[in-house]
Image (spheres, grey):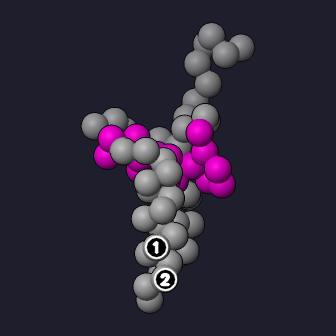
């Protein structure tokens, strides 16, 4: 398993689903579908997403990117 870091590539809004997908070894699309389906259930899904967006650090640029 990799660290929970919002990737620079493959993210749509904040990169939370992409980070979770990398962590659990699944595709980002699968995580996005799980999130959308979970929004149909009662609960604070959007607040959790915003909290994870604030907590997960963004991926840093490597030396080769400059």
Local packing at callout 2 (Cα closer than 10 Å; few below 14, some 14-19, many 20+) is: few
- At numbered mark 1, what does the secondary structure look like: helix, strand or loop? helix
Query: Which residue is label 2 attached to?
Result: 40
Side of 65 relative to 40 (left or right): right
Side of 37 relative to 64 (left or right): left
Place of residue 59 in the rendered image (x, y in percent of width and height, measured from the top left): 55, 35
Place of residue 22 in the rendered image (x, y in percent of width and height, measured from the top left): 40, 40
Q: In the picture, which quadrant includes the N terminus?
A: top left
Place of residue 41 in the rendered image (x, y in percent of width and height, measured from the top left): 43, 85
Seen from the viewer's position, the closer of residues 39 and 61 is 39
**Looking at the rendered structure, which numbered label has been put on residue 37?**
1
Q: Residue at x 55, y 74 (%)?
A: 46
Q: Residue at x 47, y 67 (%)?
A: 35
Q: Residue at x 51, y 70 (%)?
A: 36
Point out the residue furthest to the bottom here: 42
Point out the residue furthest to the right here: 66
Q: Is residue 10 above or below residue 12?
A: above
The region drawn magenta spans 10-25
Residue 42 visible within the image: yes
Seen from the viewer's position, the closer of residues 27 and 65 is 27
Are circles 2 and 1 on residues that touch, CB within 8 Å? yes
Side of 35 relative to 1 (left or right): right
Residue 4 visible within the image: no
Residue 13 in magenta stretch: yes
Q: Residue at x 59, y 39 (%)?
A: 10
Residue 2, quarter of picture: top left
Question: CA–CA distance between discs 2 and 1?
Answer: 5 Å
Place of residue 33 in the rendered image (x, y in percent of width and height, measured from the top left): 48, 62
């Amino acid at each position: 398993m990799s660290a929970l870091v919002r990737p620079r590539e493959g993210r749509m809004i904040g990169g939370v689903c992409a980070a979770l997908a990398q962590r659990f070894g699944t595709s980002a699309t699968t995580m996005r579908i799980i999130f959308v389906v979970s929004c149909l259930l009662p609960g604070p899904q959007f607040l959790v997403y915003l909290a994870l967006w604030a907590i997960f650090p963004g991926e840093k640029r490597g030396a080769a990117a400059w």
